[in-house]
Amino acid sequence: MYLTFAWRYFKAKKSTNAINIIAWVTVGVIAFATCCQVLVLSVFNGFEELVKSLYSSFYTDIKVVPDVGKTFTLTQEQINSIRNQPSVQNFSLVAEEKALLKNQDAQTVVYLKGVDDNYKYVCGVAEKTNRGKYDLGTTDAPLLVAGSGIQNAAAFSINPALPTQELTVILPRKNSLNNDPLQSLSQGFIYPAGVFTIQQEFDDKYALTNIGFVKQQMGFAADEYSAVEIKLKEKTNANEEKKKLSMLLGKDYRVLTRYEQNTTLYNTMKLEKWAIYAILTLILVIAAFNMVSALTMLVLEKKKDISVLQSMGANQRSILKIFLSEGLLLGVIGTIIGVLMAICICLLQLKFKLIKLAGGSFLLDYFPVKLMVTDFLLVAATAIAIAFIASWFPAQKASRQVFELR
């Protein structure tokens, strides 16, 4: 019943055109704000999904690192216990250290990861190797798979038509007691096999080789490692698996999920997303002032109607509900229009890639979008909540109007 009154008041001709104009302006502003919110959230979802897919090519589901220091001891019994975990699909043992990579006069500092043969099954670096081949060689004949940025910095070639270039790797020796700094470094030789391209942060920083070579150069013990990187089976809860592995390995090991390996990145993305959402919510607050004006003028317009309703037995609560329904009606109409506009724009962007990214230096040349039901519900709830709050004050004024019928 209350919505019936509200709908009649909304579409009925007013004595002053300003009331109709303000009402439709309010609907338009709400539609614009909700459309912008859905679009921005969808674009952030698209970029977040893209970044996660890029980072998942390098970071694994779970990573075990030492709680103190750079290395830890992992016995064969512990390795078998990790392998026997029902949720573990595969894992790779890692020996990692910062190294100097030299190619004659060209040199660059890299994070050299020595990994075993299982590494290609726990992350996507092998699939992202787009020049040469993914081959890490052996302990005695190590090969290097480096990021594209490192290839440029070290100026080595992967062209099979050219002679293979020998690269020099300089690593620190572990627990070296020699007072001569130069004697505390080891020098090894390695040949480039492939180049991967994932994302600039990885391409400019990391290079992979055989774990045996790194351990030999640094003087690691047979059961000494820098990390264990683990791939979980599908639909496995990473946080639950983290707790199980933490209990299994003990306090000397720190177990990190993919989110915890990139806490700063994910927190920054979320902060940016919700900061933009909060800014766009201010547009809805501005629309609320228009709504207050429109409803206040409508209350003045319908003074006689309110008196008639009171004479027919309508109490203050009923009058309040009628004008609250009027405000909610404005909010709902604007929200529906805005959400539908956003869905149409997102679907067109997904199909035709209409809005391009400037610069052309990114992996994509268009804005990625991802529609999520939770975003629609959040935006709709925000718009309707603001409409309810804005309509409360004029509705209260209408309900307190003194009965007067002439």
Image (spheres, rainbow, N blue to C red):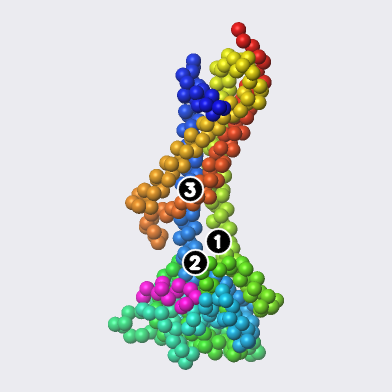
Q: Earlier in the sequence, mark 3 or mark 2?
A: 3
User: Disc 2 marks which amino acid?
Assistant: Tyr
Residue indicated by mark 3: 40
User: Which mark is on residue 324?
Assistant: none
Residue identifier under label 2: 55
User: Residue 374, position in %: x, y?
Assistant: 53, 50
Of the residues under marks 3 and 1, which one precedes in the sequence?
A: 3
Which of 234/45 is in front?
234
Q: Which range of residues does the magenta coloring cover?
A: 120-131
Mark 1 lies on a secondary structure that is helix
Q: Residues within 10 Å of mark 1 (few under 14, many from 20)?
A: some
Residue 304 sits above or below residue 20 on the image? above
In percent of the image, x 46 and y 46: which residue is there?
39
Is 140 in the magenta?
A: no
Q: Residue at x 33, y 51 (%)?
A: 352
Secondary structure under badge 3? helix
Instruction: Please tell me how many numbered marks the rendered image carries.
Output: 3
Mark 1 lies on residue: 265
Front residue of 87/190: it is: 87
Q: Residue at x 44, y 90 (%)?
A: 141
